[in-house]
Amino acid sequence: MIKFIKVEDLLQIRNEVLREGKLTLDECRFPSDNLPGAFHLGYYANEELACIASFHPQSYEGFTGAGYQLRGMATAEQYRGKGFGNQLLNFAIVYLRGQKANYLWCNARKKAVQFYLNMGFEIISNEFEVPVIGPHYVMYVKIQ
Ligand SMILES: CC(C)(COP(=O)(O)OP(=O)(O)OC[C@H]1O[C@@H](n2cnc3c(N)ncnc32)[C@H](O)[C@@H]1OP(=O)(O)O)[C@@H](O)C(=O)NCCC(=O)NCCS
């Protein structure tokens, strides 16, 4: 089941999956988490939070219309490859279409590029390095 959740609910998984469990929960917050229009989604499997993603209004240079940025996409290790990430992102895209968003973009880890390609995203940047985390690409999907 997919739900809108509070940022506090997802910090644990964000830490475990995206920060190797090395940070305090407060250090896992993004400055964008509480921007106006920001929202967070969680996929629950048997009452347990399995997959998370966060979204906030943010345009990307060179693109017109209303853009949203996806951040903190993560599926707990034991729940990967079950289609939860796919379902969560599809839910978000349908919701964002209703919010009149025109496109969604993210800084995608190189390891996750295939996941986003499967979701219909395309690569729109050269490869770039995020310190400590590794190689990334900017990826984009048109919503309407
Ligand atoms: C990327 C991630 C969020 C995908 O979540 P998930 O719930 O496992 O994804 P799904 O099960 O919905 O996968 C959907 C499809 O993408 C594929 N896929 C998922 N992760 C993949 C990966 N890392 N590499 C290649 N393919 C991947 C799946 O095989 C599946 O393909 P299929 O439908 O043809 O079988 C998850 O692997 C994860 O948390 N990874 C570590 C953190 C991370 O890299 N987050 C992204 C930051 S940009």
Image: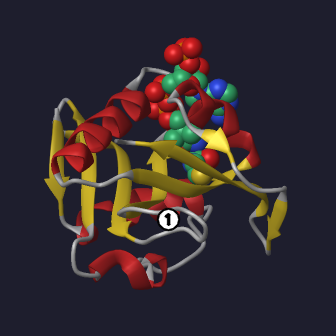
> Amino acid type of disc 1?
Asn
Label 1 environment density (alpha carbons within 10 Å; few <14, some 14–19, many ≥20) = many
Residue 24 in the figure: left or right of residue 122: left
- The residue tagged 1 is 15
Residue 49 in the figure: left or right of residue 60: left
Classify residue 143 by image quadrant.
top left
Q: Is residue 78 visible?
A: no
The type of colouring in the image is secondary structure
The residue depicted at 19 percent of the width and 29 percent of the height is 46
Q: In front: 125, or 25?
A: 125
Classify residue 44 by image quadrant.
top left
The quadrant the C terminus occupies is: top left
The residue depicted at 83 percent of the width and 56 percent of the height is 126
Please state the quadrant of the image where ligand 1 appears.
top right
Indicate whether 56 appears above or below 46: below
Percent position of residue 134, x then y: 80, 61
Secondary structure of the residue carrying tag 1 is helix
Q: How many marks?
A: 1
The residue depicted at 27 percent of the width and 70 percent of the height is 38
Percent position of residue 88, x then y: 32, 37
Indicate whether 5 appears above or below 144: below
Residue 33 in the figure: left or right of residue 70: left
Percent position of residue 48, x then y: 24, 40
The quadrant the N terminus occupies is: top left
Is the distance from the Cβ of mark 1 to the nearest ligand 1 atom less than 8 Å? no
Q: In front: 64, or 35?
A: 64
Indicate whether 79 appears above or below 28: above
Q: In front: 85, or 120?
A: 120
Classify residue 33 by image quadrant.
bottom left
Q: Is residue 34 visible?
A: yes
Q: Residue furthest top?
A: 82
